[in-house]
C-alpha cells in the first residue's frame, strides 16, 4: 500500500507540471478512486477437500462428489474486485479433479480457469492445487467439475459476487433466494461414460429426478394430483425444499442450472417473475409467468410476495426440449416465515410445465432478453467469421458429436502449457475450418455420417472481433435436432440474434447491434442458428463447448487461443503433466 501511495505522489508531481488545474483534479480523482477500490477489496481464503460420500439427494442413496462433506458444495460469497483463493485438495481415491469457475473471466490467470487438459492438468489424488482469481464483475455464477463428467456426480456449487462496497444494484429488493437446479442419475458417471463410448452405443437415458439445491424426490410427488405415488413426508430426506418469505416484500431469486442433460422450465404459483440479470449482466427488465433455463445459464428474477400472508405456493421445475420422462421437481414458497411452524403443503395444483417441444414458447423467452440501458454495445463489425456446424456422426461405428465434421479430442498436455512454451508434437496441429459446405442440408441426417477427431484449436488474433455462427442440424436419426446450450470460457459475448434453418450471408443484416445482451452461455434451438460476437481481449486458451455433459464427452467443443505470448509465467503445478512435465524436468535436470 505504501508503494502505491508513493507511486501516486510521483505521478501527481510529474503530471502537475503538464496539466491544467481541472484536468489535474480529474486525474487525481481517478487515482484516489482506484486506490479506494483497491483498499476495500478483500481476499477470501478457502480450504476445500473433494471426496466421495454417501448421500440421498432424492431419497435414493448413492455416492456423490462432495466438498468438505457438503453436497452441493459450499457457496462462495465475494464482492466485485475481491480475490478468491481456493486451496483444493483431491481426496478422490483414484482419479484427478479440476474445478471451473463458471462466468469468471480469469483475466491474467488463465491457468485458474479449471478446464482439464486445456488450462491445467488434472489434480492428482492426495495433491493440492491453489486456485487464485479475481471476482471481476458482480453477478450470479457457479462452479463445477470440468474433468470427465464429474459435474453429473454432484461436484458443483454457487458463486455469488455482490457489487462493490458503497455501490448499489440497478434494482431494489429486500432479500435473496438462491435456487441451484440440477438433474440426477442413479447410474454412476463411469457407467455413463463407458456407455457413451461403446459400440453399440448405450445411451444414458433420462435423469431419474430433478434437484433444487440438492434436494429432490424420486418416484413420488409432494403433490397429491401428479399421477404418481405421494412422498412419505416422515422421511426427512424426502422433505421439500422450503423458501420462507415475508409478505409485501421484493425478493431477488438467483437461479442457476448446472444440469448434465436437461433443459428446464421454472414457475412459481401465483407469482410473476421479472428478469433483471443474465449471466452476470443486467438486462432490460421483463416480466414472465415462467422461464426456460438451460444448462450453464444463470439469472436473477424479482418476485413480489403479494399473496395472502399465511399462504404457501408451489415452485415447479420441469423438463423442456426432451420428452419429459423425469418428473417435475417441487419446492415450496412459504409466507409463514416460521421454521418451527407445522408446514402445510399448498392446496393448489403445481404450475404446469409447457409442452416439452413448444419451442415457440422457448424462443419467446430468449428473444425478450435484451441489454439494459448503459450496457456496452458490440463493435459494429467483426474481423473474422467462424461458422460451426453441430452434427452427430460416426467414427468406426462409434457415435460422436462434431463441429464442421471434426470431433474434439483433448491431448495429454494442457494447451495452455504447450502453446505458451511452443512444444512440438503436443497436439494435432491440423487447423480446423472456419466454414462448412454452403449446400449442407441441416433439415436431414448427414449424407455421409463419418467424421474424424482433432484438436479443434482456433488461434485468434488478440483484440480482434470475432463472430461465431452456431448452426444446428438434424442428428443421425430422422426428424431429430436437439437443443444445445453453448458456454464460452474467459469472455462474455453479445448475442446478435437467432434464426431458422441454414444461416445465410444475408442474415447478417438482421443482427442486433443496438441492445444485444451480453451472456456467457447461449442456446441453439433445433434446426436453427445463433449468432454471437466477442472481442478476443483475454490472453489465454479458452474452451467453447456445449454444456450438456454427454455431448461434450462425445466431442462437441472447440478451443480458442489468443495472445498466448502475453501469458505470464504459468504455475508449474498447473502444467506438470504430458510434454510440459518433461520440459519442467529438463529445466531442473
Image (cartoon, rainbow, N blue to C red):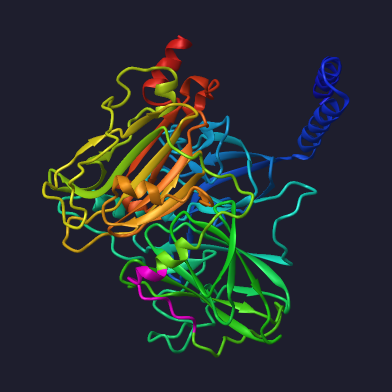
Residue 208 is at least partly visible in this image: no
Q: Is residue 358 above or below residue 70?
A: below
Q: Which quadrant holds residue 152?
A: bottom left
Indicate left or right for 472 with 73 as reference: left
Residue 585 vs residue 483, the one in the foreground: 483
Residue 389, horizontal then vertical, whole percent: 27, 46
Residue 288 is at least partly visible in this image: yes
Indicate left or right for 391 with 312 as reference: left
Residue 542, horizontal then vertical, whole percent: 44, 36
Magenta span of residues: 350-361
Residue 369 vs residue 574, the one in the foreground: 369
**Image quadrant occupied by the C terminus:** top left
Say which residue appears at 53% left-offset and 89% top-offset.
348
**Image quadrant occupied by the N terminus:** top right
Q: Is residue 534 above or below residue 172?
A: above
User: Main SS type for the magenta part?
Assistant: loop
Indicate left or right for 307 with 480 as reference: right
Residue 467, horizontal then vertical, whole percent: 40, 40
Q: Is 325 contained in the magenta span?
A: no
Say which residue appears at 41% left-offset and 21% top-offset.
580
Indicate left or right for 556 with 416 as reference: left
Q: Which quadrant holds residue 191?
A: bottom left
Q: Which quadrant holds residue 545?
A: top left
Residue 363, horizontal then vertical, whole percent: 40, 64
Residue 510 vs residue 63, the one in the foreground: 510
What residue occupies the far right of the structure in this picture? 21
Residue 359 vs residue 582, the one in the foreground: 359
Amino acid at each position: 500500500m505504501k508503494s502505491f501511495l508513493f507511486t501516486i505522489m510521483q505521478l501527481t508531481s510529474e503530471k502537475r507540471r503538464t496539466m491544467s488545474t481541472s484536468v489535474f483534479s480529474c486525474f487525481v480523482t481517478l487515482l484516489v478512486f482506484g486506490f479506494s477500490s483497491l483498499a476495500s477489496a478483500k481476499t477470501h481464503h478457502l480450504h476445500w477437500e473433494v471426496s466421495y460420500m454417501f448421500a440421498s439427494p432424492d431419497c435414493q442413496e448413492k455416492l456423490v462428489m462432495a466438498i468438505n462433506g457438503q453436497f452441493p458444495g459450499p457457496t462462495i460469497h465475494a464482492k466485485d474486485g475481491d480475490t478468491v483463493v481456493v486451496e483444493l485438495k483431491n481426496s478422490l481415491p483414484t482419479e484427478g479433479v479440476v474445478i471451473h469457475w463458471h462466468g469468471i473471466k480469469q483475466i491474467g490467470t488463465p491457468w485458474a480457469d479449471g478446464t482439464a487438459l486445456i488450462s491445467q492438468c488434472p489434480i492428482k489424488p492426495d495433491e493440492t492445487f491453489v486456485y487464485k482469481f479475481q471476482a471481476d464483475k458482480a453477478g450470479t455464477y457457479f462452479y463445477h467439475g470440468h474433468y470427465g463428467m464429474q459435474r453429473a456426480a454432484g461436484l458443483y456449487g454457487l458463486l455469488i459476487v455482490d457489487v462493490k462496497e458503497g455501490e448499489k444494484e440497478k434494482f431494489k429488493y429486500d432479500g435473496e433466494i438462491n435456487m441451484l437446479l440440477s438433474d440426477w442419475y442413479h447410474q454412476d458417471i463411469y457407467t455413463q461414460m463407458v456407455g457413451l463410448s461403446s459400440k453399440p452405443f448405450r445411451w444414458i437415458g433420462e435423469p431419474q429426478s430433478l434437484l433444487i439445491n440438492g434436494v429432490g424426490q424420486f418416484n413420488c410427488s409432494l403433490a397429491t394430483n401428479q399421477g404418481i405415488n405421494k412422498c412419505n413426508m416422515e422421511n426427512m430426506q424426502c422433505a421439500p425444499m422450503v423458501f420462507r418469505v415475508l409478505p409485501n416484500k421484493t425478493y431477488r431469486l438467483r437461479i442457476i442450472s448446472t444440469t448434465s442433460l436437461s433443459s428446464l422450465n421454472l414457475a412459481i404459483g401465483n407469482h410473476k417473475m421479472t428478469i433483471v440479470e443474465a449471466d452476470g449482466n443486467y438486462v432490460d427488465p421483463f416480466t414472465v409467468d415462467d422461464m426456460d433455463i438451460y444448462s450453464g445459464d444463470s439469472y436473477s428474477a424479482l418476485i413480489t410476495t403479494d399473496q395472502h400472508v399465511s399462504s404457501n405456493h408451489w415452485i415447479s421445475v420441469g423438463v423442456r426440449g426432451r420428452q419429459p420422462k423425469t418428473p417435475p421437481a417441487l419446492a415450496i414458497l412459504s409466507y409463514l416465515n416460521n421454521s418451527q411452524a407445522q408446514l402445510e403443503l399448498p392446496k393448489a395444483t403445481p404450475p404446469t410445465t409447457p409442452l416439452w417441444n413448444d419451442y415457440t414458447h422457448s424462443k419467446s423467452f430468449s428473444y425478450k432478453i435484451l441489454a439494459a440501458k448503459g450496457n456496452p454495445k458490440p463493435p459494429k463489425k467483426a474481423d473474422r467469421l467462424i461458422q460451426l456446424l453441430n452434427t452427430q456422426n460416426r467414427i468406426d461405428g462409434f457415435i460422436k458429436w462434431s463441429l464442421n465434421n471434426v470431433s474434439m479430442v483433448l491431448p495429454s498436455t494442457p494447451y495452455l502449457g504447450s502453446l505458451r512454451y511452443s512444444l512440438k508434437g503436443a497436439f494435432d496441429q491440423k487447423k480446423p475450418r472456419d466454414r462448412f459446405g454452403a449446400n449442407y442440408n441441416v433439415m436431414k441426417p448427414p449424407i455421409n455420417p463419418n467424421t474424424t477427431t482433432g484438436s479443434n484449436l482456433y488461434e485468434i488474433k488478440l483484440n480482434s472481433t470475432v463472430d461465431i455462427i452456431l448452426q444446428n442440424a438434424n442428428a443421425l436419426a430422422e426428424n431429430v435436432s436437439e437443443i444445445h446450450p453453448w458456454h464460452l470460457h474467459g469472455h462474455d459475448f453479445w448475442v446478435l440474434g437467432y434464426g431458422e434453418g441454414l444461416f445465410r450471408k444475408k442474415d447478417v443484416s438482421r443482427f442486433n447491434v443496438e441492445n444485444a445482451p451480453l451472456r456467457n452461455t447461449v442456446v441453439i434451438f433445433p434446426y436453427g442458428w445463433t449468432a454471437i460476437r466477442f472481442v478476443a481481449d483475454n490472453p489465454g486458451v479458452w474452451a467453447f463447448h456445449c454444456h450438456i455433459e454427454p455431448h461434450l464427452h462425445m466431442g462437441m467443443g472447440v478451443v480458442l487461443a489468443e495472445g498466448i505470448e502475453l501469458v505470464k509465467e504459468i504455475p508449474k503445478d498447473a502444467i506438470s503433466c504430458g510434454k510440459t512435465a518433461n520440459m519442467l524436468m529438463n529445466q531442473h535436470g
